Image (cartoon, grey):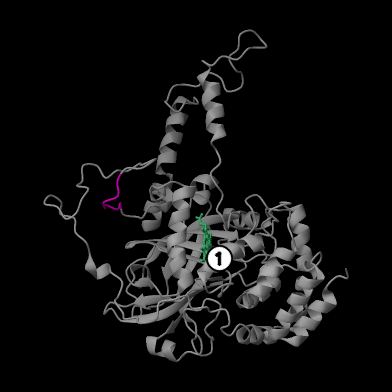
Amino acid sequence: RLVVIHEAWVHGIILAAGQINNVYNVYKEDNGAPIPDYTVSRTVGKWGPLLLEDMTLIQHIAHFDRERIPERVVHALGSGAFGFFEVTHDITRFCKAAVFKPGTKTPVAVRFSTVTHERGGPDVGRNPRGFAIKFYTSDGIWDLCGNNTPIFFLRDPMLFPAMVHSQRGRNPRTNRPDPNMPWDFITHRHEMLFQIMRVYSELGTPDGFRHMDGFGSHTFIMVNARNQPVYCKFHLLTDQGVRNLTAETAKRLAGENPNYSSEDLFEAIEGGDFPSWSMFIQVMTFAQADRFEYSVFDLTKVWPLDRYPLLPVGRMVLNRNPQNFYHEIEQLAFCPSNLVPGIQASRDPMLQARMFSYKDTQRYRLGPNFMQIPVNRPLETPYNLQRDGPMNMFNQGANVNYYPNSYSSLRTDPYSDAITYNITGVVGRHDTKDEDNYTQAREWYLSLSDYDKLALAKNVGADLKGCTSAIKKRVFSAFNLVHPTLAGNILMYTPPE
Ligand code: HEM
């Protein structure tokens, strides 16, 4: 029922406008008056001059002049679809969130993306993939905005903007990709190595968006109905099976069919072959976290699956393509701060910084009332104290705009608040650069097949083409700390200068 209501809601206004047009069968100006002609301008004589009074022409061009909004500062290139998430296993002993109540089916919007590619670039290139899910739950919107990797490059958000500058790879002077920039940064920050190894394996070139897993990556806190917390991580494993492209195929497709991944997703859904993912969680008690060999707030680390096994939760199915890409996908705004009762943020500094960054960028990218755009609205109309601002479509009528007050029956809901906990510590800049950066990367490398080990070395080696010999040396010595065979093979596959 919620899926149907939500679809009607997202499309409601558009369908209504479409119906009106069908009745009269005439294009209309934005004031509703008929458009006399869409192919010929009004001029004095055949060759002009043009007349300023031709408002059809003026409106047409003026609106066109304003068609572009800023692309996302990262993850600009992507595509998405709609569907539902249904609970298959009861996890209410861990979590009271409405989305996990047995029998619940929740509408979702999902956007897949590449991280550093610009909007309009090829969507098959080597990159991590974004995997962002918006759950329209009966308790509000929950955004699980993750990647196709269970870890991330960094553990301190201070480094994020510089990391993105270096990995986007455009030299500020030449505006051309500069092969030295990414590797220069990586070799200064060895916490990046594990994630870089995943991205330079064939996992970095998934065969479209349907054949990859998704991860919430961060440690979150789940709270049950008795307000008892546990730490948890989210995994979405593809029911289509993981399938990757070789570097050669990805490169060829980037030229032949730069929209390969979005085409694959769209056409599968259009043809009724609905992709699905199974959701699992890993759970750790606070006491276990105290004994864990790493900080559970270190986003560059995984929780070993043998000790923290995957517990099944539910299934996500994508069964509807957008009717209008810009309206429903480009204007989607995922915010890690969109949480619901029962799911709350942990202390992970990366997550805390993201909770600020996304709504901040969306106020700039889409405007301060971006939450009123149909795809971003919660199922139930929110009443609060936010008013006015550009493009306000819903200003809460005559409701009182201050609190406390003597007029409204609206109240706050302490039950929905995050749990309380104690933290003590020394205020300061605690450098985490030299946390263990190699053990998990090495274990993962050793778990690869011989083919995958060589593919990884080959892909790194090939990427060093054009780097200075000083940067190459830094790369070999960094990977040598992970495993000498890996460093040796990278050296072997690096093209001669
Ligand atoms: C998009 C910032 C780390 C996954 C974005 C955007 C910003 C941003 C500003 C653009 C949002 C928009 O315009 O709507 C940051 C910062 C980070 C960080 C400051 C670290 C401090 C991460 C991590 C993940 C991630 C760790 C995954 C675990 C994504 C995804 C998108 C995105 C999937 C695209 C969402 C969409 O499809 O619209 N990020 N990010 N980011 N980020 Fe991050």
Task: Identify whether 47 is placed above or below 321.
Answer: above
The residue at which mark 1 appears reads as: 160
Point out residue 26 in the picture as x, y percentages from the top left corner. Answer: 49, 24
Is label 1 in a helix, a strand or a loop?
Answer: helix
Query: In the current view of this chain or complex, which residue is farthest to the top?
Result: 45
Q: Which quadrant of the figure contains the C terminus?
A: bottom right
Q: Which residues are magenta?
A: 381-387
Q: Is residue 150 magenta?
A: no
Q: Residue at x 59, y 63 (%)?
A: 162
Q: Is residue 35 visible?
A: yes
Q: Is residue 386 magenta?
A: yes
Query: In the current view of this chain or complex, which residue is farthest to the bottom?
Result: 291
Task: Identify whether 377 is placed above or below 235.
Answer: above
Q: Main secondary structure of the magenta part?
A: loop
Point out residue 373 in the picture as x, y percentages from the top left corner. Answer: 41, 47
Q: Residue at x 34, y 81 (%)?
A: 423
Q: Is mark 1 within 8 Å of ligand 1?
A: yes
> Residue flagged by tag 1: what amino acid is it?
Phe
Point out residue 148 in the picture as x, y percentages from the top left corner. Answer: 58, 69
Q: Quadrant of residue 129?
A: bottom right
Point out residue 444 in the picture as x, y percentages from the top left corner. Answer: 64, 84
Query: In the current view of this chain or complex, which residue is farthest to the right?
Result: 496
Left or right, 107 with reference to 325: left
Closer to us: 208 or 397: 397
Q: Is residue 324 visible?
A: no
Closer to us: 393 or 17: 393
Q: Residue at x 39, y 41 (%)?
A: 390
Task: Identify whether 430 is placed above or below 180.
Answer: below
Query: In the current view of this chain or complex, which residue is farthest to the front?
Result: 428
Q: Which quadrant of the figure contains the N terminus?
A: bottom left
Closer to us: 367 or 279: 367
Mark 1 surroundings within 10 Å by alpha-carbon count, few (fewer than 14), some (14 through 19), many (20 or more): some
